């Protein structure tokens, strides 16, 4: 079972993606572009390049070509820029790029080197490069991407309307990650923000501006699953990268190899539950009450495997049809096997029925479960039966020093505590920053660097789900007085 998520989109939206992709690729800007653009919220312009006589103590990417590109972007007037340009144009990393991207990168480097100052010893070499590649016809997009590198990240999220708070707190978390990168690393990264207004058509139009007019290579968005699909189609038409921070539609990944998701799958959820049990007692054991659905069976299998790996004994598994009203027989069978804990895996209706019947069949059960156990929609009897239960959410919580550092930085700037979307924004920003720090400087390299950050199991690889770059785990809550509150004990890293 995949836990419920309020942002889950309808799969039917994918039917229109081909038409959306064609519209995104079209050359004409919408007639209302001027009026719409005035609504966009944009980040401040990137900081000016450091003075030549100011030492730059920040770190550079770990391969030479990416380092040279970062130096040229940030210090184009440096006396050494012409030499950097010649070396960059001839690096093996540039030579391995596809022909269009390679030509654009070499032409950009040559022009940058020639514009860096008066005549230099490198001028003949730069002019030769420009002569060789300057006559090649290029679309404006690869030229703009060469000029920007990966330094400008496009963001399309709701910054007004019903979902404004989700978008705003997400962007605030994203900014914290970029500020950390910009403090210690080059090149500096900046955001170009566009307000989707919570409308998929508006979001698609804003994505076109970013991808075609701004030459953005990396796009982040949207908050809602249904609104993310048009963005995914747009990025794949233009061979760009999309990172979806909260979409749960599993079909997004089929749109192209440049679509990535910040998604918590069954394996990390199951591992967190198993490790929770293992830390409670060295003799922990568990019984599983599972609804007979495909997704619930997959999650139950993942829980059983994770428990086995964590030395938590599975005493038994009882399966019932999702919708059966009487679960007392199955609960009694599990209780008689004397496990130290009971795991409920099923829909909210299933969990609610089990919770209500626990009061008479197994009142002292130590219950664990997942997002469907959220007590808010349950009736009072079910909440009482699940009092003290632990549930694992499809949301990330930070741990240790990253948690302390992030919360302090977020509160200092925004004067409020971070939200779940803030954490998603932070982790999304870190994924991009780590990819660039590792040496990515084009779209194809960004894809490869992000693939290295994907979970290693089959399900998460298929969805291209990104692992957190710092210590993070599925959020754990406990039911107290009928409400889900954060679990007070030390977090367990999945």
Image: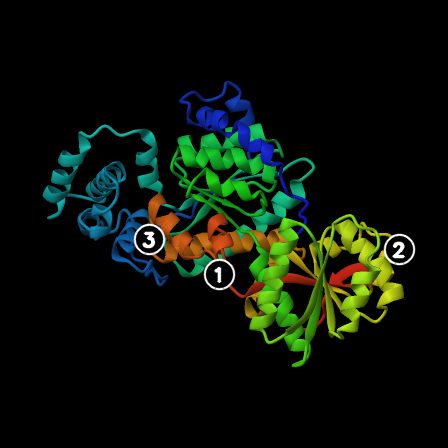
Q: Residue at x 47, y 27 (%)?
A: 18
Q: Can residue 32 be seen at all in this image of the molecule?
A: yes
Q: Earlier in the sequence, mark 2 or mark 3?
A: 3
Q: Determine the secondary structure under disc 3.
A: loop
- Residue bearing the label numbered 3: 51
- Residue bearing the label numbered 2: 380
Q: Earlier in the sequence, mark 1 or mark 2?
A: 2
Task: Report the front residue among 80 and 131.
Answer: 131
Task: Report the front residue among 24 and 305.
Answer: 305
- Quarter that holds the C terminus: bottom right
Relative to residue 332, is residue 302 drawn left or right?
Answer: left
Q: Earlier in the sequence, mark 1 or mark 3?
A: 3
Q: Determine the secondary structure under disc 1.
A: loop
Q: Residue at x 57, y 55 (%)?
A: 265
Relative to residue 224, is residue 448 drawn left or right?
Answer: left
Badge 1, how many Cα within 10 Å: few under 14, some, many 20+?
A: some
- Residue bearing the label numbered 1: 469
Badge 2, how many Cα within 10 Å: few under 14, some, many 20+?
A: some
């Amino acid at each position: 079972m995949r836990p419920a998520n309020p942002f889950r989109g309808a799969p039917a939206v994918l039917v229109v993606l081909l038409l959306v992709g064609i519209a995104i690729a079209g050359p004409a800007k919408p007639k209302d572009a001027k009026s719409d653009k005035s609504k966009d919220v944009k980040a401040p312009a990137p900081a000016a390049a450091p003075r030549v006589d100011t030492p730059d103590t920040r770190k550079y990417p770990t391969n030479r070509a990416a380092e040279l590109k970062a130096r040229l972007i940030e210090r184009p007037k440096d006396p050494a820029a012409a030499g950097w340009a010649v070396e960059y144009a001839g690096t093996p990393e540039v030579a391995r790029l596809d022909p269009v991207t390679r030509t654009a990168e070499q032409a950009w480097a040559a022009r940058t080197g020639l514009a860096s100052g008066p005549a230099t010893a490198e001028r003949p070499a730069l002019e030769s490069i420009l002569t060789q590649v300057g006559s090649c016809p290029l679309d404006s997009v690869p030229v703009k991407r060469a000029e920007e590198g990966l330094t400008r990240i496009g963001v399309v999220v709701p910054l007004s309307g019903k979902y404004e708070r989700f978008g705003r707190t997400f962007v605030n978390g994203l900014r914290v990650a970029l500020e950390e990168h910009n403090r210690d690393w080059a090149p500096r990264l900046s955001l170009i923000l566009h307000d989707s207004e919570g409308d998929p058509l508006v979001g698609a139009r804003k994505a076109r501006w970013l991808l075609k007019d701004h030459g953005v290579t990396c796009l982040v968005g949207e908050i809602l699953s249904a609104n993310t699909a048009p963005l995914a189609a747009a990025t794949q038409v233009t061979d760009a990268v999309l990172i979806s921070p909260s979409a749960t539609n599993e079909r997004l990944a089929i749109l192209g190899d440049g679509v990535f998701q910040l998604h918590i799958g069954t394996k990390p959820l199951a591992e967190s539950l198993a490790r929770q049990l293992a830390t409670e007692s060295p003799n922990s054991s568990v019984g599983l009450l599972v609804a007979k659905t495909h997704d619930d069976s997959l999650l139950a299998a993942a829980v059983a495997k994770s428990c086995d790996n964590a030395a938590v004994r599975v005493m038994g598994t009882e399966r019932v049809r999702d919708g059966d009203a009487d679960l007392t027989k199955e609960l009694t069978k599990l209780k008689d096997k004397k496990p130290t804990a009971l795991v409920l895996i099923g829909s909210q209706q299933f969990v609610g029925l089990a919770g209500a019947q626990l009061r008479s069949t197994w009142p002292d059960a130590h219950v664990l479960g997942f997002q469907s156990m959220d007590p808010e929609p349950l009736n009072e009897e079910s909440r009482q039966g699940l009092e003290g239960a632990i549930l694992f959410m499809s949301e990330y919580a930070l741990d240790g020093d990253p948690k302390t550092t992030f919360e302090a930085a977020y509160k200092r700037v925004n004067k409020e505590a971070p939200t779940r979307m803030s954490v998603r924004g932070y982790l999304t920003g870190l994924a991009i920053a780590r990819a660039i720090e590792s040496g990515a400087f084009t779209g194809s390299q960004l894809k490869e660097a992000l693939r290295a950050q994907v979970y290693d199991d089959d399900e998460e690889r298929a969805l291209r789900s990104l692992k957190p770059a710092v210590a993070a785990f599925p959020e754990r809550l406990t039911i107290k007085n009928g409400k889900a509150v954060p679990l007070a004990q030390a977090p367990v890293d999945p």
